[in-house]
């Protein structure tokens, strides 16, 4: 399982991914699935489920708080974090 | 050819610039339009360039770095964001048409803070006189005609104290004089990529203090695409349409070259070339050189007038001898009016980090030959 951390722009998502990279966490910049994109095209950073808590904490401290956190299940479906 | 027109466009660039342009055309598509490799490679390059520019120009947040197609484009955005018809706007006496014409087009009440050439104290005093009641101010960092470095830090301080937002036209200073956007406290700073930043033509940069800006163009940004309104955040708000990725890739290499060489070293070199060129022309009585009494207020740009020879004819004769310079009014009639050269214009020699002493001696000797 992976988490999708969404951001308002590609630039923000890229910067967030670089913050995580410097902290030793792999984050891949990707487009948000259409069904989960509330305002149209958007970008996210995908992190492994085991890194999610740490990643969000690091991003909050760095001033790059994700807009939303989405869970991508093993079958590819995406749902908002419960 | 001896190229001495870098104040218009730097022709000589680091080799890495043209390689990067070619490589971008081969491998990169468009950022913000897909998640596939070539789109993300383009996105990384654009972000790297934004980041390098933020470092070079002391910008706190790299979202404040907006790519434009030229300094003129950026200045139009800045002016349209701050100025409404009838607003009082104070500008220096050395502004380019990229400032004067947009203000005139809007119908602004333009007040020129005119002051003598190479006199920074007088420039500050002129702004101090004119600022009351102004809605905005515009000042070039360096005159494109005379290489005169205006006291923008002091003028910015005056503007801050008066609560007047300042637009800095850094077209001639970026890459040599340098710019500290954070400490300057201006509302905007605009510059081209193709002059001192050593990037390709068709690139430009606008530094924005705030996302409260008026877009010139509206369109797709790859973000919030279900909204009819443009995004309210930078850089997306001002960057609709496809980025000039090859241009930005080249600009990135120009900026990297400057970061290694340093702007201060570039400025020193250009000043040394100017001094050597000027000394070579000592004793040529027909040549009037516009040289600052204090070298600290002039970059590597030298305007001259030649007694009894039209400036355009002088430039033509120099071109015949393989020396490329610009003559006339340099799209800055205001600067010529202020300096008293509006009727004759000037011949402008502008030096780059890639010019050599041998080149400037040859150029000076060519001018001597013409005047024999």
Image: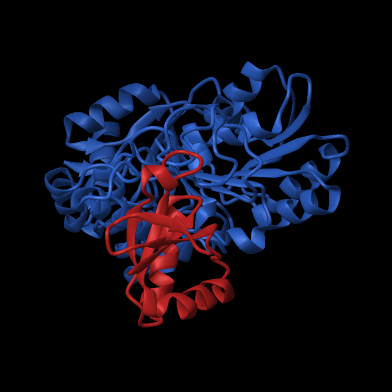
Chain colours: A red, B blue
Quarter of the image that includes the C terminus of chain B = top left
Residue closest to the eye, A22 or B105: A22
The residue depicted at 52 percent of the width and 58 percent of the height is A68
Residue B90 x, y percent position in the rendering: 74, 34
Which picture quadrant has residue B363?
Answer: top left
Quarter of the image that includes the N terminus of chain B = top left
Above or below B344: residue B250? below
Residue A46 x, y percent position in the rendering: 36, 64
Q: Is residue B48 visible?
A: yes
Residue closest to the eye, B41 or B284: B41
Above or below B55: residue B339? above
Which picture quadrant has residue B201?
Answer: top left
The residue depicted at 65 percent of the width and 48 percent of the height is B210
The residue depicted at 74 percent of the width and 37 percent of the height is B136
Residue A52 x, y percent position in the rendering: 44, 75
Residue closest to the eye, A1 or B352: A1
Above or below B177: residue B144? above
Q: Is residue B50 visible?
A: no
Q: Residue furthest right?
A: B132
- A56 relative position to B184: left or right: left
Above or below B249: residue A22? below
Residue B49 x, y percent position in the rendering: 36, 56
The residue depicted at 58 percent of the width and 30 percent of the height is B99
Q: Residue furthest left?
A: B26
- How many marks can you see? 0
- B80 relative position to B21: left or right: right
């Amino acid at each position: 399982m992976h988490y999708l951390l969404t951001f308002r722009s590609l630039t923000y998502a890229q910067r967030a991914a670089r913050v995580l990279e410097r902290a030793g966490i792999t984050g891949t910049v990707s487009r948000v699935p259409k069904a989960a994109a509330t305002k149209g095209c958007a970008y996210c950073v995908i992190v492994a489920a085991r890194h999610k808590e740490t990643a969000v904490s690091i991003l909050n401290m760095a001033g790059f708080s994700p807009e939303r956190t989405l869970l991508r299940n093993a079958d590819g479906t995406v749902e908002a974090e419960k | 050819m001896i190229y001495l027109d870098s104040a218009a466009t730097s022709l000589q660039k680091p080799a890495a610039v043209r390689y990067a342009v070619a490589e971008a055309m081969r491998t990169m598509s468009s950022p913000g339009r897909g998640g596939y490799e070539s789109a993300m490679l383009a996105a990384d390059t654009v972000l790297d360039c934004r980041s390098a520019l933020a470092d070079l120009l002391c910008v706190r947040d790299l979202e404040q770095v907006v790519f434009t197609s030229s300094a003129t484009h950026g200045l139009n955005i800045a002016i349209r964001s701050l100025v409404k018809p009838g607003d009082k706007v104070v500008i220096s006496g050395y502004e380019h048409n990229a400032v004067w014409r947009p203000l005139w087009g809007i119908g602004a009440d333009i007040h020129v803070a005119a002051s003598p050439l190479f006199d920074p104290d007088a420039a500050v005093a002129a702004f101090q006189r004119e600022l009351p009641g102004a809605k905005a101010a515009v000042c070039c960092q360096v005159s494109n005609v005379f290489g005169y470095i205006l006291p923008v830090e002091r003028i910015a301080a005056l503007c801050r104290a008066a609560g007047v937002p300042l637009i800095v036209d850094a077209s001639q200073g970026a890459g040599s004089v340098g710019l500290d956007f954070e400490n300057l406290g201006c509302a905007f700073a605009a510059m081209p990529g193709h002059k001192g930043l050593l990037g390709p033509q068709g690139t430009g940069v606008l530094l924005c203090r705030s996302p409260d800006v008026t877009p010139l163009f509206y369109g797709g940004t790859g973000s919030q695409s279900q909204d009819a309104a443009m995004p309210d955040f930078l850089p997306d708000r001002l960057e609709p349409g496809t980025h000039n990725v090859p241009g930005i890739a080249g600009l990135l290499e120009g900026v990297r070259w400057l970061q290694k060489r340093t702007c201060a070293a570039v400025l020193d070199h250009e000043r040394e070339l100017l001094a050597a060129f000027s000394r070579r022309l000592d004793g040529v009585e027909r040549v009037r050189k516009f040289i600052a009494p204090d070298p600290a207020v002039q970059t590597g740009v030298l305007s001259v007038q030649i007694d009894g020879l039209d400036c355009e004819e002088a430039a033509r004769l120099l071109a015949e001898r393989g020396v490329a310079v610009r003559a006339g009014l340099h799209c800055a009639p205001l600067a010529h009016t202020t300096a008293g050269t509006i009727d004759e214009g000037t011949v402008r020699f502008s030096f780059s980090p890639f010019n050599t002493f041998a080149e400037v001696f040859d150029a000076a000797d060519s001018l001597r030959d013409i005047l024999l």
